[in-house]
Image: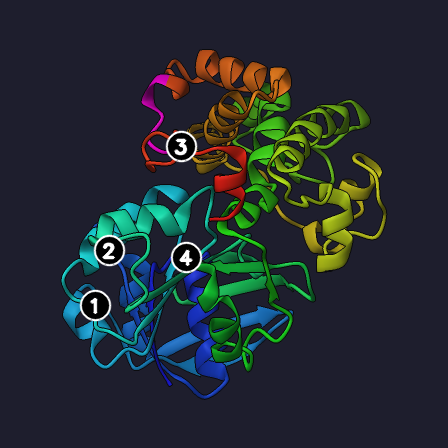
Amino acid sequence: MRITVLGAGAGGTAVAFDCAAHGHEVRLFDFAAFPENIAAIAEAGGIHAGGDIEGFAAIAYSGHDIDAALDGAELIYAVGPAYSTEPFGKAVAGKLSPGQTVIVTPGSCGGALAFKMAAGLAVSDDTVRVAETSTLHYAVRLTEPGHIRVFLKLKAGNLLAALPGSNTQPILDLIADVYPSMEAADSVLQTSLQNANPIIHPSVTLSNAARIEMTGGDFLFYEEGVSDSVGRLIEALDEERIAIGQRLGITVLPDPEMGMRQGYMLADNYGQAYREAPGFLGIGAQPELDHRYLHEDVGYGLVFMSSLGEQLGVATPSIDAVIEIASIVMARDYRADAPRTPATLGISSLSAEELGAL
């Protein structure tokens, strides 16, 4: 199969490597503002990986020409932080063909909706099939341009939902050789809410803000950054995320429970389980606070959850507190910026029953 991967960060590079290692012809695209990894992969002719998946995989194209990247594509992955979804959608607008499939991974709170809007596709349009996943299928970091370390490829617990949902199973069948453990979600709101990054990353980052600034992130994010008190903060946010799902009639698993299913964690608690999680061992903290752990996970994730909770009449005081503190610490108003909310996605007038059926 001809596969195009949009996004050459660590996640996109892992997706490209894994698909190519399974025998698919893979083309990798990123914007010209991000040349380093793209150039290294083009020069080497492929990607080097070590860790849970390893080896060298040849890549057919690595560059900044979107038309060359999309040439003959049957399956397209849009891989990156939430703020990359709309730019990728705009980049392919008018260039997609009937029968193609696009997977936004991870969906990061409404990713499939956001991609469709940016690409000029109606929500109900399934001539181009669009889906999203609840999380990235890897714990992965770039170690140098063209090289990745994969701490974990998920064993289970990554959900996929198409928009409309009738396409979910056909898309799961399409990707089953690379992702046999991918599971069907009830809806794109289940995939959105099951992503716990907005619950974890801001809690740990804000609780370790001084340490990040004073050391340049010279510590292990989970092993040294999650004390039991930090775990209580994660748990408080998680309870509110789960409550939003309950109001929608959607099952949202507590993060430690999902982490055990995925292979990240060995125990079902919010403190020690993160510190000793095999999937998190060795992952360092970010070098500065100006990072996606706040900009994406607060600005997109928590603001979306708070707005959705308000729409549904579900109180989110802990989530709201973290949004406010992050805004003060970063000297920006994440709630006012709010690039992705139910309102921006055109779903703010829907009832709980209508939202749950998306």
* Disc nearer the start of the sequence (3/1): 1
Density class for disc 3 (Cα within 10 Å; few <14, some 14-19, many ≥20) is some
The amino acid type found where label 1 is placed reads: Leu
What number of labels is visible? Answer: 4
Look at label 4 and name its amino acid: Leu
Q: Position of residue 177 (x, y in %)?
A: 55, 82
Q: Residues within 10 Å of mark 1 (few under 14, many from 20)?
A: some
In whole angstroms, how far apart are the C-alphas of marks 2 and 4?
A: 11 Å
Of 199 and 8, which appears nearest the observer?
199
User: Where does residue 26 sit, x and y in percent of width and height?
Assistant: 35, 78
Residue in the foreground of this view, choosing between 177 and 13: 177
Callouts 2 and 1 close, C-beta under 8 Å: yes
Of the residues under marks 4 and 1, which one precedes in the sequence? 1
For label 1, the residue is: 96
**Amino acid under label 3?**
Pro
3D distance between C-alphas at marks 3 and 1? 26 Å
- The mark that comes first in sequence, 3 or 4, is 4
